[in-house]
Amino acid sequence: MGTTTPPRTLAEALRARGDDSLAGLLRARPDLLNPVPNDITQLATRAGTRASVVRALEHLDRFALQTAEALAVAPDPAPYDTLLSLLTGDGLDDGEQHDDAGAAITAALPGALATLREQALVWGEDDRLRLVRTARELLAPSPQHPSPTGLGPTVAEATAGMSPGRLQEILTATGLPATHDPVSAVAALSALFTDRTRMAELLDSAPVEALSVLDRLVWGPPYGEVTPNPTPPVKWLRDRGLLLPVSTRTVVLPREAALHLRAGRAHRVPEPVPPALAAVAERDPQAVDRAAAGQAFTALATVEELLKLWNGGGPTILRAGGLSVRELKRTATALDVPEPIAAFWVELAYGAGLLASDGETDERYAPTPASDEWLDLPAADRWTHLATAWLAATRTPGLVGGQDAKGRALSALGPELDRSAAPDVRRRVLALFAGLPPGTAPDPETLLRRLRWERPLRGGPAPGAPAAPSPGGTTSGGGPEGTDLRSRLALWTLNEAELLGITGRGALSAQARALLEEGERAAAVRLAPLLPEPLDHVLLQADLTAVAPGPLERPLADMLSVLADVESKGGATVYRFTPGSVRRALDAGRAATDLHAFLAAHSRTPVPQPLSYLIDDVARRHGHLRIGAASAYVRCDDEAVLNEILADRRSTGLRLRRLAPTVLASQADPGPLLEALRDMGYAPAAESADGDVLITRAGARRTPPRTPPVPVPEGPPVPDDTLLGAAVRAIRAGDTAATVARKETPDSPSSPGPSGALPRTTPAETLATVQAAAMTGATVWIGYVNADGAASQRVIAPVRVEGGFVTAYDHTADEIRTYPLHRITGVAELAEEA
């Protein structure tokens, strides 16, 4: 057997891979699958496009990225030892690079290189490593895009276009022999800068001030401005080529000289090992679970209160979408939380599909029909629904109150809050939590450092590396808010996870761990025993209050919220009965006897006499006055009551006048008139046009059925194994059709045309060839035009030929198919492999 020929192109390197390796590439870079490439050559071409390479680089960890950056400044191709030397240095520095760091780099480099190879960013054997051209262009230094390594161009790149006379002057100043060949001159200067001994001798003769100039440029950026008459230190460096001109006012430190000053290192701080997570506390896991469960219960109560608050129709929607600042403040006051926390709860309910726009002309937010189904679920299932929606949501409530790129305020439920990176950041943060022992609360700062190591291009620039500005004013990889967005998302995740009960006392709870690893059902089973059981009773007290010593069953809680006002919340909720709250229950259609029976049935203490008197007193006066539309009128069978109202100076603004002994008319609308008389201490009831008392039950306004907002995906979804297997088979089959050798038949027109052209044969030749292939079990190559006129090449193994159709196993589609013979443009036999 002969030796294997090293691949000369990326396509050849991919063609030599196994199916599992190709599937790994498509899994790591799913953008390459849309659509499925026709063959390996098209796959390699697509893998080298700028957009795909940028996406792949953004998903590298810091050391894999540093490895790619080192290859970008290394010779092309580069041996493995050269790459290792760029990362570890030559060991001749001043002690900054320690042996243990070098050992860590040596141990981590094969894994980083394997990652780059797997993602088709690097190809070739260890003695000829090649970074794909697009990645080299993105990571290599240039005046427009400084290298992340802080290195400048090579001597050859920096002296391109320099006059031979100027090159001779540099050679003379450095003591090198003169040559009239520019290529030889550049080679001699490069050899000087890469020779440790001669370079040390040259720098030993340099003025101290010149060395200070080099110190400022050595770790980047390597460019500096000079005046037409430079200072002597700068002139000394420029004369010897240690600073080479880029323009009339700009000079650059060449890469070879910088690497000598760096002791051969491409990076100031190589990071082969991810930063360790430091723990701020080690807590009892059971205490963590209980604390998280308590907060989960609070989360459920808060969302339920929000739904109840907007039950009859919530706030109106701004013209540009979202909540106004005033409505957010009002909601925060009602929920008794700060405004940023209120924005989180509102966004959570919206993302979970519990709130939506009602779609009316006067558009408002209201609960959805799904909210009623959610309220009927057990408490643990309601929590897992919220937690799952939060994990997948691209809505980012932490942005509320900030400004967009045009300086406009970002409002809660507004259209500009989607950030596609949010789900990935949340899951990565929780994955780091899950990697710690139960009960461990990590230090947020070390957690951020770990996230930046895992995704450096998205989490911020590498230490010591300059950020590359983009035309829009952002820095590379950071999204609309710059490189800091993912760090802010991580901090928001920590706060939101605590609010939602994902974490407790700073550590990941067991129920959240089950949600991440096993799914919603397992999380609900873990959480259910930790949640308090709802109660069917309250404790009535003589001061017209009721104490709920825990969560109440839903019917009891709903009725009590109508009959009484919440006075305080906490472990025990205190309700207060007032004339207004009792009147609210009567307005909802409850009779006094119903209220007495309800309290007696649900109180563990006797119903206090003051409360019974309050209900009877309000009920006796309720509806004594009737208000209808005149604009509005007031009628009462007791003339003395109407006389009392007319005599009260507080009724002056209502502009009342007597129409009859028992009827007053007003120019105010019925609603304001009703409220004004209630404020005066009366208990009027609204009346219909037929004279009947209007019953105003608790509102139940619902939107039409709405689906939850669809999260904005960050890139294409990761394909499943079935899709990957089918894609690899299709690519292999297409590659076979595109690259397999075909038999030549020069005496007939059946010879294959130029590469990529469809075979052409006469109908008789086509029929004869496929019939012979069906008899011998041979595989042939055909050109086929479908009913839509789309042409394609296929490799088939004919099984049966009859009735003008050929039935064959299609290697391209990996299935049995039937083709009309009249749509086959031609057929060619495949040459036997040598």
Image (cartoon, rainbow, N blue to C red):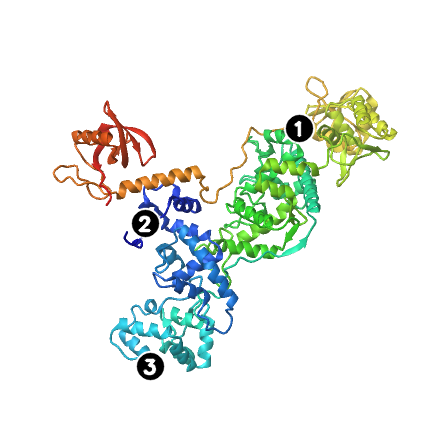
Residue drawn at x 29%, y 80% is 177
Mark in front: 1 vs 3: 3
Quadrant position of residue 769: top left
Residue 311 lies, in percent from the top left, at: 65, 31
Query: On screen, 230 above or below 355?
Result: below
Is any part of residue 627 visible from this angle?
yes
- Label whose residue precedes the other's in the sequence (1 or 3): 3
Residue 652 lies, in percent from the top left, at: 76, 32
Gap between marks 3 and 2, in whole Å? Answer: 47 Å
Residue 334 lies, in percent from the top left, at: 69, 40
Gap between marks 1 and 3, in whole Å? Answer: 93 Å
Residue drawn at x 37%, y 74% is 193
Q: Amino acid at mark 3?
A: Gly
- Name the residue that disc number 2 marks: 11
Q: Amino acid at mark 1?
A: Gly
Tell me the SS state at disc 2: helix
Residue in front for this viewpoint, 598 or 786: 786
Gap between marks 1 and 2, in whole Å? Answer: 66 Å
- Label whose residue precedes the other's in the sequence (1 or 2): 2
Residue in front for this viewpoint, 86 or 449: 86
Quadrant position of residue 604: top right
Residue drawn at x 29%, y 77% is 168
Q: Is residue 456 left or right of residue 791?
A: right
Residue 554 lies, in percent from the top left, at: 71, 30
Rendered image: mark on residue 699: 1
Rendered image: mark on residue 175: 3
Label 1 Cα neighbours within 10 Å, binned few <14 / some 14-19 / many ≥20: few
Residue drawn at x 17%, y 41% is 744
Q: Amino acid at mark 2?
A: Ala
Q: Is residue 415 left or right of residue 616?
A: left
Tell me the SS state at disc 3: loop
